Amino acid sequence: MKVYIVVQVSGSFIMSGNGIKIYKSKSVAIKRRDILNRDIQASKFKYVVLESGDWTKISD
């Protein structure tokens, strides 16, 4: 079973938003990422979705 998390990234620096929430559904994680990216103002950080295993980035 794969799980997904939404984190902020800037270059090689990764940090969780307001704590890490684990999503079982890829589509729900992507929707959450879209909401978070829409709400941020000019920032060098952006939110991405990482997939469990080796925490590969699956989306920008």
Image (tube, rainbow, N blue to C red):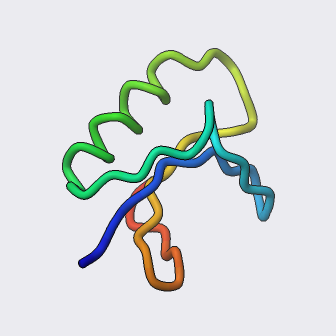
Residue under the image location 56 percent in, 46 percent down: 20
Q: Position of residue 2 (x, y in %)?
A: 29, 74
Residue under the image location 19 percent in, 49 percent down: 27
Tell me which corner region of the image, top left, top right, bottom left or bottom right, holds residue 51.
bottom left
Tell me which corner region of the image, top left, top right, bottom left or bottom right, holds residue 13.
bottom right
Q: Is residue 56 above or below residue 17?
A: below
Residue 10 falls left or right of residue 24? right
Q: Position of residue 35 (x, y in %)?
A: 38, 25
Location of the N terminus by quadrant is bottom left
Foreground pick, 33 / 1:
1
Residue under the image location 75 percent in, 36 percent down: 44
Q: Position of residue 30 (x, y in %)?
A: 31, 45
Q: Is residue 46 above or below residue 22?
A: above
Residue under the image location 54 percent in, 42 percent down: 47
Which residue is at the far bottom? 54
Residue 13 falls left or right of residue 1? right
Foreground pick, 40 / 20:
20
Q: Is residue 20 above or below residue 55?
A: above
Residue 40 falls left or right of residue 23? right
